[in-house]
Image: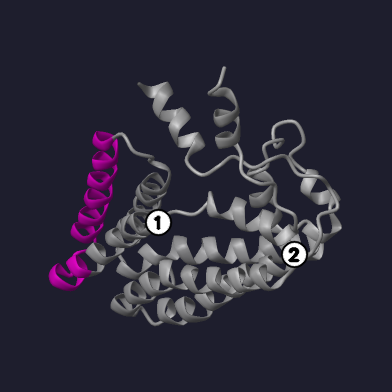
C-alpha cells in the first residue's frame, strides 16, 4: 500500500505546458544514439575502402553487406533493439543490388539519392497541405496515439511549430541532393562515400541543434490538454520485466 504513491509518481513526469516542451520530450524518444550512427555509416565506409582497394563492385558490395549483417548479429546476441541496424542492413542490401546489377560503383549511392528526393517532395507537400511531417513523429509519441493518432492536428500551435521544424528537414534533404547529385553524375565514388557519411549523422546533429534552439526559444501554449508523459526509462523497465 505504501509503495503505490511512489510507483505512481515514478510512472509519469510533469505534463509539458508548452508545445515546444511537449515536442522536445517526444522527439527525444525517436532518436538513436552514437551506436546507431556508426551502424549506419560503417557499411558505406567499408564499401568505399574495398572499392578503392580492389576496384571490384561485387567485392565491395559483399564486404559492406557482410559488415551490416555482423552488426545486426551483434545486436541479436546482446538482445538489444534492432530498429537502427535493421534499416542499415536493408539500405546496404539495396545499395549492393544497384551496384552489382549495374556494374558501376556509384550506383550504390543512387537509392539514397532517390530516397532523399522522395523525402524532400513528401515534406514539401506536408507543409503545403498543413500536415507537417514532424507532426506525425510527435503524434506517434502521444500516449493516446492508438485511439486518436491525429490529435496533434487539432492544436493550431502544434501545427505551426511542427511546420517550422519540418522546414529544417526540408533543408537537410535539399543540402544532401545539392551535394550528392553532382558527385553521382561525375562518378566520384570516394567523394560520394565521404559525403554520405558527413551528410548522415553529422548533418542530423546540426539539424537537431537548430530544432533544439527553435524549441527552447519558443513558448507556444498548448490548446489541447496532453496526457501525462511517461518518465524516461519506464518503458525500458517494463520491456525488461516482460522479457525476463
The circle on residue 33 is: 1
Label 2 crowd bin: few (<14), some (14–19), many (20+), radius 10 Å:
many
The circle on residue 161 is: 2
Return the disc, 2 or 1, that comes first in the chain's sequence: 1
Q: Position of residue 108 (x, y in %)?
A: 36, 63
| Figure label count | 2
Quadrant housing residue 140: top right
Which residue, as the protein is rendered here, is positioned at the far front? 2
* Left or right: 138 in relation to 80: right
Q: Position of residue 129 (x, y in %)?
A: 82, 60
Q: Position of residue 124 (x, y in %)?
A: 71, 66
- Magenta span includes 19: no
User: What segment is highlighted magenta in the picture?
Assistant: 49-78
The C terminus - image quarter: top left
Which residue, as the protein is rendered here, is positioned at the far top? 1
- Magenta span includes 50: yes
The answer to whether residue 130 is seen in the rendering is no
Q: Position of residue 196 (x, y in %)?
A: 39, 70
Marks 2/1 in contact by CB < 8 Å: the verdict is: no
Name the residue at 13% across, 68% down: 54
Q: Nearer the viewer, residue 60 or 75?
A: 75
Name the residue at 61% across, 38% down: 12
Quadrant housing residue 133: bottom right
Colour scheme used in the picture?
one colour
Amino acid at each position: 500500500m505504501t509503495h503505490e504513491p511512489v510507483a505512481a509518481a515514478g510512472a509519469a513526469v510533469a505534463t509539458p505546458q508548452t508545445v515546444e516542451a511537449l515536442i522536445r520530450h517526444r522527439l527525444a524518444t525517436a532518436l538513436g544514439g552514437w551506436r546507431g550512427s556508426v551502424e549506419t555509416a560503417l557499411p558505406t565506409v567499408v564499401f568505399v575502402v574495398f572499392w578503392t582497394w580492389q576496384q571490384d563492385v561485387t567485392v565491395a558490395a559483399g564486404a559492406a553487406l557482410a559488415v551490416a549483417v555482423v552488426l545486426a548479429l551483434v545486436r541479436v546476441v546482446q538482445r538489444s533493439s534492432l530498429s537502427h541496424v535493421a534499416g542499415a542492413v536493408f539500405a546496404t542490401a539495396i545499395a549492393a543490388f544497384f551496384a552489382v546489377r549495374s556494374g558501376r560503383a556509384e550506383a550504390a549511392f543512387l537509392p539514397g539519392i532517390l530516397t532523399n528526393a522522395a523525402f524532400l517532395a513528401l515534406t514539401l507537400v506536408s507543409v503545403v497541405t498543413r500536415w507537417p511531417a514532424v507532426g506525425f513523429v510527435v503524434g506517434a509519441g502521444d500516449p493516446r496515439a492508438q485511439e486518436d493518432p491525429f490529435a496533434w492536428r487539432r492544436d493550431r500551435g502544434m501545427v505551426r511549430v511542427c511546420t517550422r521544424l519540418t522546414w529544417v528537414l526540408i533543408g537537410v534533404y535539399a543540402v544532401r541532393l545539392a551535394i550528392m547529385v553532382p558527385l553521382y553524375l561525375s562518378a566520384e565514388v570516394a567523394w560520394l562515400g565521404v559525403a554520405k557519411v558527413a551528410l548522415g549523422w553529422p548533418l542530423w546533429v546540426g539539424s537537431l541543434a537548430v530544432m533544439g534552439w527553435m524549441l527552447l526559444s519558443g513558448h507556444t501554449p498548448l490548446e489541447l490538454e496532453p496526457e501525462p508523459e511517461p518518465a524516461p526509462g519506464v518503458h525500458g523497465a517494463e520491456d525488461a520485466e516482460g522479457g525476463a
